[in-house]
Structures are given as C-alpha cells and as structure tokens.
Image (cartoon, coloured by chain):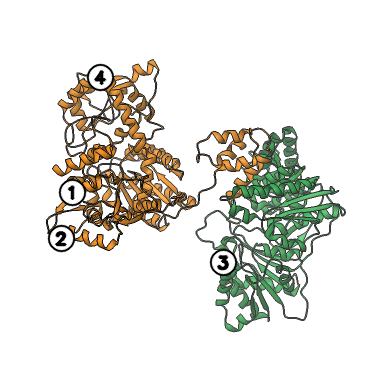
Chain colours: A orange, B green
Amino acid sequence: MKVWESNLACLREVNPALAHQLTSVPAGEAELRPSRQGPPTLVVMGRHLHSAYDPQGEARDWAAAQEVAPGEKVVVFGLGLGYHVLALLERGADLWVVEPSRGTARLALEHADLAPLLRRDRLRVGRDYSDLPRPARLVAHPPTRKLFPGDFQRLEDFLAGNDPGDPGLLRLLVVSPLYGGSHPIARYCTRGFKRLGQEAELLDFAGFFPAYKVVQEVSGRAQTRHHLTSELLRLLGEIVLAKVREWRPEVVFFLAQAPADPSLLRALKAEGVVTAYWFVEDFQVFPYWRELAPEVDLCFTLQREPFLEELAALGARAAFLPLAADPEIYRPLSLTPEEEARYGASLSFVGAGYPNRRQFFQGLLDFPFKIWGSDWDHPGPLAPLIQYHGARVSDEEAVKIFAASRINLNLHSSPWCSGVNPEGDYLNPRVFDLAAAGAFQLVDWRRQLPEFFAPDEEVAVFRTLAEAREKIAYYLAHPQVREEMAARARRRCLAEHTYEKRLARALELLAEHLPGRLPRRPRPPDPRDFLREFLPPGHPLRDYAEQAAPGSLTLADLVERIRSGSEPLGEPETLLWLVHEFQQGLDRGRF
Amino acid sequence: MTPKRVLVLQLARLGDLVQTWPLLRRLRAGGPQARLELVCDAGLAALTAWGPRLDGLFGLEMRDLAARAVREPAAVGRRLQAVLAELRRQGYEKVFNLNFSRLSLLLTHAVGAPARGYQPLLGGREFGRPPWLAYVFALAHVRRLNPLHLSDVFRHLAPVAPEDPPPGAARPSPGREPLLALVPGTRHPKRTWPPAAFAGFVRELSRHTPVRFLLVGTAGERPLGEAILRELSAPLRERVHNLLGRTGLGELPEHLLEADLVVGGDTGALHLAAALGVACLGLYFGPALAAETGPYGPGHLVLQAEPPCHPCREGDPCADPFCSRLLTPELAARAALALLAGERGTLPPLPPQVRLYRSSLDGLGAVYLPGDGRPPEAADLAAAAYRAVAGRLAGLNGAVDRPGEIPPDLKATLARLAGVVRGRNGDLAAAEPYLLLPLKAFRAEAVRQGTLQGRRALWEELAGRLAEEFALLLEAWAA
C-alpha cells in the first residue's frame, strides 16, 4: 500500500484532520476493476466512475474539453480515482477537488498518487468546503455528478454565492407499527422532522395492538386468524387514507412493520402523496419487503449490498439510511441512590432474548451482570440475571439503566448464528442510543461500525467471547478510560447521528431520488414576529413565546393558551385568535 | 325601540344575508332615526342596496383575509385591527351577532357593546345564547320538527316593532310570454337538482305553454348551464338565455326582477328573488328544509321530497341521493304552471314522499302549509305546538293559529305525549323517540347556559315553563 502511505503522509502535513477522517473510513461500497488499458476504474452503485477501457485517455480528453486557462481557479466536483484531476493539473489549473464520498476518496488515495493535489491541501471531502474561493468555476466529473446531484447543486449554490435559502416546508405523516422496536422510532422521527422545521404528525397505531392480540387469540385456526388480521389491517389502511385525504401531507413516512400493504400504497399513490418506508430491520430476517418495496416511492434501508441490489432487481427505489438517536430521550442522567441501586450493575444488557444472546451470555455468568428486556422465557442458567421477570423496559427506564451501568453490552441480535454474527453489517438503535446517553458501550463488531464510531476510541468492540471477557475486565478496571470514550461517543453522536441529522439526509434523498415530486409549502411566518408587533413587551403571552425554541411554537399553541386562560380577552389576544381563525379557512364552522 | 346606534354582524353567504333583511326591516321600523349599520362579506356589499336602508356598511373581505392569513398574519392582523378600531369608534349601543362562528364572536367581543344573538361570555371565549336562540338550537336537534324560519329566528332577536311585512310572490303579468329564471346551482351537490332534470323541466313546461328561460348563477356554475343546454333540442335552446357567470352580483336582482317566476334549490339567488317579491318555486330535498329556509313571504311554492331520511345533513355521506329524483320534471312543471296561472287550486297530484308547500305568514312569521290536503301527522302537530311555544317566547301570544281538524287517534297521541311531558307516562326520551327530544335538548342547553351565565335557577325555571306550555297546548288540542 505504498501509494496510500505516501498520500497519507502528504495529507497529514497539511490537513491532519482530513487525514484522520480518511484513515478511519472503511473503503466505500465500491468495486475496483482493472480497465482494458491497465489502470483501474471504480464501480460505485453500479456506475462506472471512469472508462472501462482507457481511463487515462478519457481523462485527458475531458480535461482538454474544459478549456481551463492556466492559473484559472477551478473547483472540480468528484475525485473518482483522480485521473481527470491529474489531467487538469497537468494543464496548469489552480484547482480544488470536492469529493462527496469519503469512501471513494479513500479508494483514490489507495490507488493513485495524488501528491500534487494533496500537497497543497486542495482536497475537500463531503460538505467541508467552506473555505473554497468564491466565485470559482465549477466543473463536474460527470459520473460523480450523476451519483450525487444534490451535493453538486449545493456546491454550485455555494460557489455562486447563493444562500440555499429556505426551500419551504413539507408536511409529513409518520405511520407507526402497532408494537415493536420501530414504534419508538416512529415517535423520534416525528419529533426529528419537527425539529427540522417541517410539519409532521404521527399516526400512532399502538392503540390497536390490544385489538390485534384479541384477533390472534380468538381463533385456533390459522386461516381464520389470517382473515381477521387482514380485515384489521384493511381498517388501519382506511384510517391512513382518511388522514391523508383530510390533512393532505406531501409524504407518508412508514416505519418498519407499520400497517402498509400493496393496495394501500397504490391508493396513496393515487392520492398523489410520496410514500417512503424505513425498513429498520435485517432484510434477511424479515422478508416482507419483497411485496412492499416495489410499491413504495423510496425505501430507506439499514443495509447496503446485497440488499440494495435485491431491491433494485425488484424495481424498487432504495437508499441507505442508518439509524440514529433522539438526544431528548437518550441523554446523560443523574440518578437517585435508590435508582442507582435498582438499575445499576457492572455489566448490563437491555434487549430481547434472541438465541444468539442467550447462548453468548452464558459465557459471562461470572460477571455482575443484569439483563433487562422481554422474550427471556425459559432463561435457564441466565435466570438470576433477568430483571423484572422479563418485562419490557420503557425508554425512560432504559436511559436510567444506561446511566447506572458501568458497561453497557450491546450484542446485535441474530436468530440463526450463535454469539457474534460475523456477517453482521447494520447497526441497531442501541449503538446510537447508548452513545447519545453518554453511556459506555461494548458492542460486537459490525461492518458498518467504523463509519459511525471509532472502534475502541469511542465505543469498545469485541469479536469473540474471549475478547469480550478480556475487555469487560479491562474496562471495569479503568473507569477514567470509560468516561472519556463515552464522552467522545456522545459528542460524535450529537454531531452526526441524531434523528434530526438523519432525517435531514432522508429529505435530501427524497429530493434527489424523486426530483420535482415534493413541492414545498411556503413556511408560515414565525408567530413571534406577530406577537412582537401586536403585544406590548412584558405581555405574558409574548414572554411565553420568546422562551420557546424557534420554530416550535405555532399560532394554534398560543390560541390554546389564550383559550384556557381566565382573563378577559384584550385586543391583542382577540386579534391573534381572529388571525388564527382566518388561517383555518372559511369552510369550517357554521354561520 | 331600536337603540340609537346599532350594528348587525352577518358574515355568511348571500342567502344568509338576504334572510337577515326582515330583521333589518324590524330594526328600521323600531327606530327610523336610529343609525343602523351592517358588517357583511365585502363580496356581498353591492346587494345591500336592495335591502332595507342602512346608515353604514362595513364590507369585510373574508375570502381575501383567509387566503392571506397563513403567509401574512401580521398584515391580516393590521387590517383587522383597523376594522375593529373603526367599529369601536362608532359607539354602538347594541350589536346583533347573527353568526354561530368563532370569528363573529371575537369581533362582537372586540366591539364591546352589549350583544344580542350569540353573546361572548367568559371574557370572549364562550358562546352565550339568549333563551330565544337556545330554544331554536333545541328545536334544531330534530329538524323535521323545526317550525321556525331562519329569517324569523333573526327577526325576533329585535324588540317587537311595526315593520312592514315582507313582499309576497308577485302575480305574473297577464298577456305576455312568461319568463322563468332558473337557478341551477346551490352550495352543495346534495341540494342541487340535476341538470338533466332542469332540462326535462324546460321541455315539459314548454309543451304546455310558450315560455322563455334565463339561467342565472356564478361563473363556477357554467358547467351546469352547459349540461342543461346540451340536453335540449335546438329550438328549445333558443328559448334559454344562459347568463351564468355573465353578470355580477349587482346585476343579479335586476335579472331576477325581470322574471315572472324563479325556480331553484335552496340557494341564495332564490332567497333574493323572494325578498324582491318575485314568485318562487323551490325544489327542496336532501338537507334543505322549507320550514327553515323556504322562500320567505306569502305565495311561493316549495316542492319538497320527504323520504324517511329527510332532512339529512350536508356532511353525511349518501350512497344514493335518490331524493332529488323524487321531484320529477313533470311535477315541477305542473307546480310552475300553477304559480304562473296564479291559482291556488289546481295543484298536481303528488306521489308519496313528496309534498307541495305554499308559503304564508302568521303572527310569528313564515309558515309553509302543505297544499295536498293530507291529514296531519303527529310530527306536524308537535311542530305546530313547538311553534306556538316559540310565539310565547317571542312575546307574541296567540300569534300562531291552532291546527285545523285533528283526527281522534292523533288526539289520543297528543294526550299521551302531554302526559309524558308531565312525567306521568314514562321517560321523556323513550316515548316517540324524537317528538319530545327538543324539550330534552332545551333543558340540557338551559343548564349549560344557566351555568355559563350564572343564572342557573332562572334558566331551569324557564325550561320547566316551556315544557308546561307545550303540554298545555297538546292537551287543549287533544280535547
């Protein structure tokens, strides 16, 4: 890997932060292939980044076609493997390169001598290009531009000196499942969209879970149960449709296992809404996506290949969207001594009793270990460790457990293999929840992990039982190290892995994959401007509103406050309420 | 006596505004020197010149404000602030709030003068109703039994005054070819007679007598007009002048006044025609109920479809709105002929579930009398009793005529009902599932309003008194 070492050395001198970033990035999901002429080309998401025949020749032709004057300041969008960049440098351009994908940047550094570029600190990766000269001429590496149209647009706006401005607001209906792990995620998503300043509402079907259980228990016959369940699901679909028809969202955002069947998805399509489905499960464990994915406008997945390929083969549109954490729920807590005693342990695990966990944990019986969560019936030797007789633990309690435990063990579930799944790719919600909570985490190795958290720097990692045991002992003996790692993980999580950040990406992906399908509504003015104009300073309503987070308060909230008050309405309150009534439109209400 | 400075708030549609004119007439009659002012939708301001004389008019641009309120709340707020300042400057002694809407309640509260109609309570937050409106509200629980016209509901909010009666249906001018104005559109599909039926009406009527037709309505209703014309043969089309969307609101009264007869559903233009004294034939079905909103004034006719589900509510879904088909073009043509001939006798024979009403006036206001000579049912008598009680509440004893000949079996029913009211024959709600429901509803509303207004005892006593009067009437008729 000589090229890699020398590139890295170059980079470290001028931009150590970027060098560090690139070392911890695993190679992107891209395939290196030799070209006919020899030098390699790159295939990303099925697209060739360079000619499969003669990448260098292609690059020279392209560089010539740009007609760049010597000394001209140019920003190139897309590094690829660097051929075209080097060709342009040969022509004397004074250039910078913005490469949207860290994975691709890493591959380039591994295979091409990019010293001329790196020596002058001219490589930027991702969105980190705020120091680029403006205005500057922007040229695109065409395959990269096709792969990342949104990023290109953003760079173009930036270089032109345009503010991205406010694209306006979307109305999203988030649909939850009846129960299960993705149910809280539906709530976090709703909150996340709102924090992004969008209009979001949750259609929470948890209330139907008891009904669903009745249906499952009422008949001993599978056929009858199936029929009744279908009827129930049909009703739930009608509820979604009714809500959509009245509320008119632009997007219906389903979480995994929400009641969606192909006929509902088609009906929603007929209503003109965009449907998205976040499949937050292992696609191999839950195969129902085969039926649904082709009918959904955009599927979000936790896994990349081969899942994305399989989805593409079905004709479904899909994009990678990993999980995140809600920092409002998962946060460091200080506990009372009683809570410390109840929830605290040297080693804790919160989660369901999948077979691999049951098997693995038997190797940890000698540690002071508490196991929380459901589906731990017939625990065998684990029995003394199971808390609350295997009752489900709420989010609020989970946060307390995290805070009270010295080491939080996170072993990804697998119904098939025992212990650590060597093929494991995606990250479960706990990885993020623990990080956000500032809780020290020991997690099994997953292929995606290094993309999100630095192994053994932010989260501790194990691949085998032996390694787990060793690390448990080590970290129990080094509380200072634990604290520092947990703090780093929390910083990282808050900076990059909150639902707000994740859903912002989801919205970008929607815009990229479905161009023109999401007309934005103009954002309503901040009601506080209204209040400042019509209410004198010191007015209780004005004070109340000033304290609220920007974008979180609507006129309806203020009217509710007025309505529940007891002081006679003065002119300002009356005006506010009148404007609110006009906002509701004139069709409502009887005259 | 009308106070010296009065404001009337009527922010709803054309039909509601026109049906407010009898109140304005009464207020005018009660205080010829008083300053009588009106707030209405700016789009309807042009019409007010055709109604009772006003000393001031505030047109509020409702549609525009609603359209701008989301994106420009501050601008809308400023406009409303200016309107309120202007209204407060007038120094009104009384405000008549006629709309059951939050908007008008807030405006009423902001103007600050004592209110009639819907009164702001609890610092402007709650709707207070006076006994008159509470009674109307109670009657509305069983619309089938509602004997009060909207115009009279408004009118009796004002103190009794010697106002002129409303114009009645003008007799057609003899010797010239009749001109009929057809109003094909209403605000809701459930009230709208199908274009094919209108076309059939044109055809059927033209078979009997040469007639010319005007189609009047808004630009949005043009497709209805086109659909009607499409169904007509070329010669008939010549006789139909399509004015839909061609005239502004200001010219509508002139066109209506040209006509000898206006035919349409329960819609604003029909009410306007009646208010102008043009003879009207109303085609009522679905949610439309002649007793509530028939053409106001004597001499009009209303054909009303009355299957068991009538009257329904606009918002209720309906799998098969067959009721509009019960009013056939032939039936409507015969009714139109009867009106044009100015006779009262030769009304067409009616199929079951259809009734033909003739509008008239009694001491309380508009009544709609079935012209079919069918004997009354229990519901008709109950409605009459409710109307008589309304008369008492409005301070008009004996204003309501006693019903005519009552068959013995119905007398027995009336006696039994009276017994139930007096608590003798069982629970109020159990008997005749709905005939006595308004009394129960009034009692509930009385408790509510009494609590809101801090006069619980007074309201409860009133509820008892009304029930007693109702029972007395029934007993008198049963004797």
- For mark 4, give the secondary structure: loop
Disc 4 target residue: A478
Q: CA distance from mark 4 to mark 1?
A: 42 Å
Q: Nearer the viewer, mark 2 or mark 4?
A: 2
Is residue B26 rendered to the left or right of residue A402? Answer: right
Chain containing mark 1: A
Disc 2 target residue: A53
- What amino acid is labelled 1 in the image? Ala
Which numbered dot is residue B325? 3
Q: CA distance from mark 2 to mark 1?
A: 17 Å
- For mark 3, give the secondary structure: helix
Residue A139: percent from left, percent from top = 32, 57
Mark 4 vs mark 1: tell me if same chain.
Answer: yes
- Give the crowd class for mark 4: few <14, some 14-19, many >=20 residues within 10 Å: few
Chain containing mark 3: B
Chain containing mark 4: A
- What amino acid is labelled 4 in the image? His
Q: Residue at x 20, y 20 (%)?
A: A473
Q: Nearer the viewer, mark 2 or mark 1?
A: 1
Residue B156: percent from left, percent from top = 78, 50
Q: Nearer the viewer, mark 3 or mark 2?
A: 2
Residue B67: percent from left, percent from top = 59, 54
